[in-house]
Amino acid sequence: MSESNTPNTTPTAVAADAVRILYCRCAYAQVVPPAVKDAVLAGLADAGRGFEMVPDLCEMAARRDPHLAELARGTGPLRIAACWPRAVQGLFVLADAPLPQQGVEILNMRTDTAETVLAGMLAAPEGSAS
Amino acid sequence: MIATPLLPPRVVVYEGAGATPLPSGDRAGIFASLLDRGYAVTRAGTGAADQLAGGAMIVIGCFPEGPPAVADASGQCEVAVRDVTGLSVGETIAVVEEARGTRRMNRPPDAAAAANGPVANTVDTWKPWFPVIDTARCTNCMQCLSFCLFDVYGVAGDQTLRVENPSNCKVNCPACSRVCPEVAIMFPKYHAGPIDGGPVADADVHREKMKVDISALLGGDIYAKLRERSADAKSRFSKERSADQALAERRRCLTKLADAAQIPREVLDALPSPEEIQRRVEAAAARAAAAKEAASGGSA
Ligand code: SF4
Ligand code: SF4
């Protein structure tokens, strides 16, 4: 991507070495409690950092959306707020974009509180000074 | 397959250099509204987006000096930039919808419409319901492939099971998860574990084996039983005048079966003719057998 007249206005999610954050809205079903997904989204929105949001990982996996492959092979740790880790891993496999064995953390908005999920999503990466 | 021809546009909410931040009270509302309309959203700062996957991108932000001209050097991505300074959440969404133009996309059901009952499953409102395989549990026995009449399953190049046509799956039908002896089939939007992807306990494995036994009790092959029942019903229907009566009879015949295997009644009502079921069962069984033979031949 390039810009023609304004410097520094091309968007990106996060720097390559930072923790990447992915939020799944589960928009096609009500399996994630709405209060939890709304509170997690609000917390991420207020955290002052770049992140990715998808309407529904299931729908994207069925389309084998290339964006899932970008996420799976990108550099840096990846944290995903969605549902059961087994299901999320299976969805990436189905999309021909298996998640790496290391560096991926999946937080479960079906069973955990918004506070727990947000704390996990926004925690400083392992080994960082902050 | 899913009939949505194009990837949905991705919306980039840009708040880096050259832009002022969105009002903090509106930000989460804008994100939620976009997601609930089916858009993928990136909240972005400053830098270079180097991994765009083609399709279209709509960049929104508050640009005090007007929207920057942004172009995709690769030519693979259509980019539209819109200034949303001073707009409400609703007005911002309207700007994005206008920028999308006539590009089609699958859309989640409108919350108000969904509250009034099931939403019609049309091209643009497909509910993502399909089996997802836990590859750590799956033994590639191919029982699910033999069971499914709708070509949802296939075989990958390495002779392992693959969910080939997710959108062929019958919405809300988790029947194939009941035939998997390893509890390896998940439906993430199911209401309960372990089918929803939750942890699998030893008791679940036992229970799922019981389900296979139930299907064995029903005739060894659930579809063989269906065929029998359909054939019985057909011979009765031919003596009947009323289509309504015929339908009621078919429903009555299949009630027990539906309850045993937790197959939604609409799925049973939509089954093809007994002859077509027979043909599909044989085709699926042949595929499963060929895959197993290739796998064992490869290891011999
Ligand atoms: S991955 Fe889980 S949270 Fe996301 S859409 Fe699928 S079922 Fe919902
Ligand atoms: S029935 Fe279960 S174990 Fe067998 S191939 Fe299907 S998913 Fe795998």
Image (spheres, helix red, strand yellow):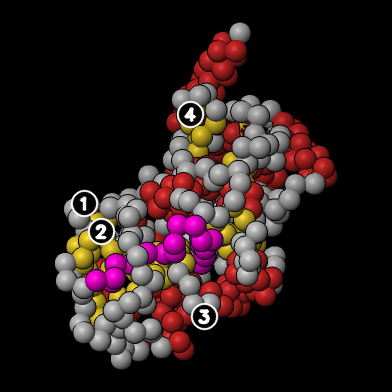
Tell me the CA gap for discs 4 and 1. 32 Å
**Dot 2 lies on which element?**
loop
Q: Residue at x 41, y 79 (%)?
A: B30
Observer able to see residue B4: no
Sequence-first tag of 2 and 3: 2
Residue type, mark 1 in image: Ser
Quick one: label 4, few (<14), some, or many (20+) residues within 10 Å?
Answer: few
Q: Which residues are magenta?
A: A7-25
Q: Disc 2 vs disc 4: which is toward the camera?
A: 2
> Which of the numbered marks, if any, corresponds to residue A1?
2
Residue furthest out toward the front: A129
Instruction: Check mark 2 vs ligand 1: CB closer than 8 Å? yes or no.
Output: no
Instruction: From the viewer's perspective, tell me whether residue A14 is left or right of residue A102.
Output: left
Please tell me whether residue A51 is drawn above or below residue B6 in the rendered image.
below
The residue singled out by tag 3 in the image is A46
The residue singled out by tag 4 in the image is B156
The residue singled out by tag 1 in the image is B74
Q: Residue at x 70, y 45 (%)?
A: B260
Residue B21 coordinates in the image, percent (x, y) = 38, 83
Tell me the CA gap for discs 2 and 3. 27 Å
Asked if badges 1 and 3 are on one and the same chain, I answer no
Figure quadrant of residue A126:
bottom right
